[in-house]
């Protein structure tokens, strides 16, 4: 009966077993996973746009090759994640439709513009750095296909973070103009990066249930603090200043205290009011429409192949 299946499900989750696509699961568990995984997939795909903005203007062949590879990795991450969400009974087309119609969310961070080349380094260092901290625990999330997708994604994000930091090192040790550019990028990306972890725990409606179901393995605030603690020494090593006058080591907590995050800005961006939110969705819709011939050609080719086989 339903109560029995429910209890068995809860016991398996509590024992850290993976739940697989054909296993029974509560409808709310399925829904919250579709929500989180599809948002995550959309973030990877929309996340290609700010970086794509600099592809034709990368300062050297080496930097261009690295950036191309990184953007292609993000596309691959989106594909693994869409495939993981599809195992829960939602189609790729439904998810795409929801994104284009403004019904699906994607990370707030990708609604900010990439104004200079240093932003590409800052994204690798800070945005991929934040993404890794959030995603390493997700390798042990309770839904098997999501957890397995995260393993490869984390390996690639780790390379992305390193290349971003290396690029920042070059700028931070460069000419005064390059140093100013690096500092300006840190100034603009620092606070939005902290917002990637989501609202504070006491204002995070999904956290309690997602933690109980072991979809999330750590809370938003805990991961945000961890990110700050690992990133501050990295900024110091670059000789850059984190734009937070209240940032201070707290020996009792063995962590950094930090200043107030502008949550009004966060919620405005979540509502779709980010600086370049409209351009991002327009770019996705334009790509979907102008590339429809590729999908049609692939379908026609497959139909021909099947005819031949028959
Ligand atoms: N942006 O109750 P909670 C990347 C929403 S990394 C937009 O705390 P939850 C790599 C939240 O959905 C970025 N919305 O929610 C890359 C919820 O609304 P809903 C993607 C946000 O789910 C690097 C409401 O606020 N990573 O792409 C945000 O328990 C470079 C209440 O929040 C992931 O998606 C936000 N920042 O915790 C690519 C990681 N924060 O859905 C290219 C997986 C919260 O009820 C270049 N996701 N909201 O309508 C997660 O870990 C979680 O979903 C959280 C949010 C932690 C993001």
Image (tube, rainbow, N blue to C red):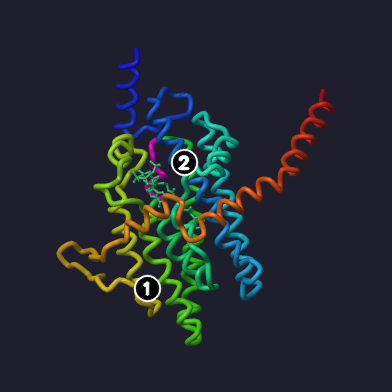
Check disc 2: other Cα within 10 Å, few if <14, some if 14-19, many if 20+. Answer: many
> Helix, strand, or loop for circle 2?
helix
Q: How many marks?
A: 2
Q: Magenta stretch? A: 135-142
Q: Residue furthest bottom?
A: 176
> Is residue 144 depicted above or below 289 in this figure?
above
Residue drawn 50% across and 50% down? 43
Earlier in the chain: of badge 2 and badge 1, it is 2
- Give the quadrant of residue 67: bottom right
Of residues 310 and 210, which is closer to you in this image? Answer: 210
Q: Quadrant of the N terminus?
A: top left
- Give the quadrant of residue 302: top right
The residue pinned by badge 1 equals: 235
Q: Nearer the viewer, mark 2 or mark 1?
A: 2
179 drawn magenta? no
Residue drawn 60% across and 61% down? 52
The residue pinned by badge 2 equals: 37
* Whole-number angstrom distance, CA of label 2 to CA of label 1: 31 Å
């Amino acid at each position: 009966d339903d109560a029995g299946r429910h209890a068995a499900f809860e016991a398996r989750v509590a024992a850290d077993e993976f739940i697989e696509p054909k296993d029974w699961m509560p409808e709310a568990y399925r829904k919250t996973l579709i929500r989180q995984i599809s948002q995550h997939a959309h973030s990877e795909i929309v996340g290609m746009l700010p970086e794509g903005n600099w592809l034709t203007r990368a300062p050297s062949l080496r930097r261009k090759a690295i950036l191309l590879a990184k953007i292609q990795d993000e596309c691959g991450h989106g594909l693994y994640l869409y495939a993981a969400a599809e195992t829960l009974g939602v189609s790729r087309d439904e998810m795409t439709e929801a994104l284009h119609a403004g019904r699906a969310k994607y990370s707030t961070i990708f609604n900010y513009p990439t104004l200079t080349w240093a932003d590409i380094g800052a994204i690798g260092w800070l945005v991929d750095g934040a993404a890794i901290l959030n995603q390493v625990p997700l390798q042990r999330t309770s839904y098997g296909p999501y957890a397995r997708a995260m393993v490869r994604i984390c390996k690639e994000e780790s390379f992305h973070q390193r290349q971003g930091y290396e690029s920042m090192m070059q700028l931070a040790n460069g000419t005064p103009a390059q140093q100013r550019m690096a500092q300006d990028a840190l100034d603009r990306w620092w606070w939005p990066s902290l917002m990637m972890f989501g609202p504070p725990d006491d204002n995070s409606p999904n956290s309690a249930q997602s933690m109980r179901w072991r979809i999330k393995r750590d809370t938003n605030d805990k991961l945000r603090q961890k990110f700050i603690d690992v990133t501050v020494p990295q900024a110091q090593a670059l000789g850059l200043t984190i734009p937070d006058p209240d940032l201070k080591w707290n020996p009792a907590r063995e962590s950094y205290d930090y200043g107030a995050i502008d949550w009004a800005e966060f919620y405005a961006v979540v509502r779709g009011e980010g600086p370049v939110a409209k351009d991002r969705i327009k770019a996705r819709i334009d790509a979907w429409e102008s590339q429809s011939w590729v999908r049609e050609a692939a379908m026609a080719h497959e139909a021909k192949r099947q005819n031949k086989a028959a």
